[in-house]
Image: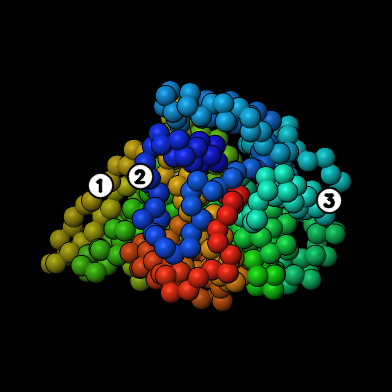
Amino acid sequence: MATTAVAGMELLRRGRVDTRGLPLAGAKDVGLTEYAALTFGGWDLFEEDLEKAARNHAVLTDSQMEAVAPVLRGMRPWPAASNAKFCKNVVGTATKKTRGLREQVQAIREDLTRFKKEQGLERVVVVNLASTEKSVDLTRPEFATPEAFEKALDANDADIGPAMLYAYAAIVDGVPFANFTPSVAADVPALMELARRTGAPIAGKDGKTGQTLLKTVLAPALRDRALHVEGWYSTNILGNRDGEALNDPASKQNKLDTKGAALDSILGYKVQDHIVQIQYYRPRGDNKEAWDNIDVTGFLGQPMQIKLNFLCKDSILAAPLVVELARTLDLAKRRGEGGVIDALGCFFKAPMSPDGQPVEHAMAEQQRRLMTWLSKGRTRQAEHPPERLRG
C-alpha cells in the first residue's frame, strides 16, 4: 500500500487522477497539508526500487504505471529493522546491521533526521505499514512506564518487536506516529505515556479498509432496528505480501483479534457465533474478496439472512487512509495536541483510547467525531502554515 500511496499522490500531482477515494479531499480551510506538498520515504526489507515493487504488486493500470515509472524508479527504501521471530513469513535482505535494539532505534532516528534534511522538510510523520507481527503480553512490567521500557530496550528484551522500535523512535522525538497494522506498537502503555510527555500525536491500530468498514456501518443499523444478530460469518481471501504474512498462525491471530473486536461493542451483546477467517490465496494478488453471512432474528422471532460479497483491491482502499493519517496527525502536531488522537478512530479496526476507556466503533459516530475535530481549524489558525511533509 505504501507504493500505491506514493504513486497515487504523483498521479494526482500530474492531473492524471482526481481525488476520488480520498476521504478528506473535501475538508477545506481546516489546516490540512495539501496533497501536492507530501514527500515520501521509508523502510523495507526488500531492496528493489519502487517501480519494481509497483510492477510486482500489479495494482496500477499500465498507463498509470508508465506515467509514474520514472519517479518510482528513483525511489529506493532504506534498510529496515527486522526480527523474524515476530513475522516468520516475510524475511528480506535489506535489514539494518546493528548489534542491539538501542542501535536499531538510533538508526531509525538518524534515517528520519537525514530524510528531513535532504528533502528540506519542516516536519515528518511516521506511519507503520509493515507486515503483521505476532502479539505480545502488554501486561508485563517492562511495558508499563517509559522508564521501564528504556531499561528493556537496553537489555534487548525479546518481547520488543520492530513495530515498537519504530513507534519509540518517532515518539521519543515528538514525531507523530500511526500504526496501520495489528502489530503491537504505540499501544504499549509505556509508549502512550511517552507520547503524552513528548507531545507526539499517535493513532492506531490496524487500518479499517474493507470488511470491517462495512461491518461497522451495518451493525449499528441492525442494532437500531432491534434485529438480533445470531451469527456473523466473515471470511477473506487475499494473495499479496500481507496475505503471505498472515499465513503464519501467530500473525494471523493478531489480525483476527482486531477484526473481531468491533461487533460486540457496537451491538451491546456478545454474538455467540461470530466467526472471522483469513486465507492466503496466492493467485488473488492484491485483489481481495471479503464474504459475510449474517443471521438475524426479528419480530415474532422470525429468522432472516443478509449476505455481502465485497470484491476489492486492498491497496486501493488502504493507501488513501494512509495519506489522510499523515495529514491529520501533522495537523494535530501543529495544533499542539499530543498523545492519543481519538478523533482518528474512524481509520482503524481497533482505535486507541487515551485513558483506557471503551472506544467507539460505529462508523457514523466515528466520522462525526472526526469532522468535529477537523472543524476546529476553521476557528483558529495554525501557528505554522503547512509546508512539505513526509507521509
Q: Which residue is mark 1?
A: 307
The answer to whether 102 is drawn above or below residue 91 in the figure is below
Q: Which residue is mark 2?
A: 20
What colouring method underlies this structural image?
A: rainbow
* Mark 2 vs mark 3, CA separation in Å: 42 Å
Residue at the spot x=12%, y=67% of the render? 300
Residue type indicated by callout 3? Glu
* Mark 1 vs mark 2, CA separation in Å: 27 Å
The answer to whether 42 is drawn above or below residue 300 in the figure is above
Instruction: Return the residue nearer the eye: 302 or 346.
Output: 346
Instruction: Return the residue nearer the eye: 193 or 189.
Output: 193
Q: Quadrant of residue 164?
A: bottom right
Dot in front, 2 or 3:
2
Q: Secondary structure at mark 2?
A: loop
Question: Which numbered circle lies on residue 120?
Answer: none
Q: Which residue is mark 3?
A: 103
Q: Position of residue 319 (x, y in %)?
A: 48, 44
Residue type indicated by callout 1? Lys
Q: Secondary structure at mark 3?
A: helix
